Amino acid sequence: MNSGIRTLMMSTSVALAMFASQADASVVIAGTRVIFPGQDKEVTVQLDNAGQLPALVQAWLDDGDAAASPETINVPFTLTPAMFRLDPGNGQALRLLHTGAALPKDRESLYWLNVLEVPPKVNDDANRLQLAMRTRIKVMYRPTGLPGKAADAPAAVRWELQMQEGGKGYALKASNPTPYYVNYGSISLGSTEGTVSAGAGHVAPGSSKLFPLEAVKTAGFTRPEVQYSAINDWGGAMQGTQQITAPAPR
């Protein structure tokens, strides 16, 4: 790879890691997540250039560190092509191959697909600001033979209302007993007193995670319940409610 291009793409990808979104990019990924079945050796991910200009595209996987340089990341997958030109109106299929490296067989593993789009240089306006756009979506490796179904996992999560350390107010604690990642587009605490947002995020298999309730300083709720929107394998939203399984601390 040309050293100038490498420097540009690495520095730009780190700087814009948390700011670019698929909605802003001309190069779009077909889907909001990738499921890699354990029985398959490879999966394909379709990219399309919906813009009016060609783009230089770099694609890579990371294991959770969004700021890591593509050249330093070690993941059990190979992605080809890793860099290419994509003309307007055209598409490109990325091949994601499992290297055969050992992965847990009793639960899903999570990685992230990064697609960095660098627009061509425009010479007609010296004052034009051009930005590279980065899209980052989940890749979930799903071993064969896992019990249950991924679609049923959100309903199996147990919820508690508890005080955060240091007296920082209350949080919802989600405990996921399933072997699947549970992804939430939104989470809130509902009661007869109203609804309070707890943000969004995911809960790893067999793990727990806190979702802070920034506006909640007291546990005085009547009939509290968790209201959520879980995201399925196809990016669709599944609405649900669950009772708090432990008494609210007072």
Image (tube, rainbow, N blue to C red):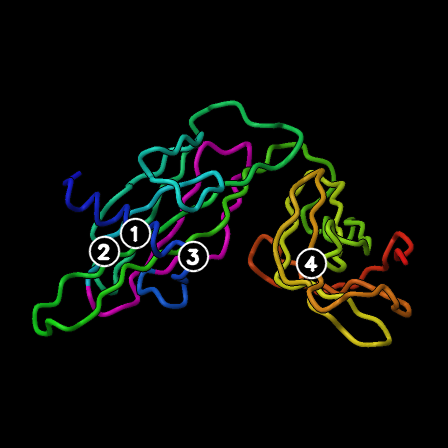
The three-letter code of the residue at mark 2 reads: Leu
**Occupied quadrant, residue 44:** top left
Work out how far the residue at label 4 is from the one at label 2, CA to CA, in angstroms: 42 Å
Mark 4 → mark 1, Cα distance in angstroms: 40 Å
> What's the magenta region?
28-53
Please name the amino acid that badge 3 sits on. Met
Dot 4: element = strand
Answer with left or right where residue 52 lies relative to residue 202: left
Query: Which residue carries the number 3 mark?
Result: 18
Judged left or right of residue 24, residue 146 is: right
> Could you tell me the amino acid type at mark 4?
Pro
Magenta span includes 72: no
The type of residue carrying mark 1 is Gln
Q: Please give the label number shown on residue 92.
A: 1
State yes or no: discs 1 and 2 in contact (Cβ < 8 Å).
yes
Eye-nearest disc, 4 or 1 = 4
Mark 1 to mark 2: distance in Å? Answer: 7 Å
Q: Residues within 10 Å of mark 4 (few under 14, many from 20)?
A: many
- Position above or below: 32 against 23: above
Would you call the spot at circle 2 few (<14 residues within 10 Å), some (14-19), or many (20 or more)?
some
Mark sitting on residue 212: 4
Query: At 43% across and 57% down in the image, what residue appears?
Result: 18
Tell me which corner region of the image, top left, top right, bottom left or bottom right, holds residue 72.
Answer: top left
> Is residue 121 placed above or below 64 in the rendered structure?
below
| Mark found first going from the N terminus, 1 or 3 | 3
Helix, strand or loop status at disc 1: strand
Q: Mark 1, mark 2: which one is toward the viewer?
A: 2
Q: Residue at x 72, y 44 (%)?
A: 208
Q: Which residue is mark 2?
A: 86
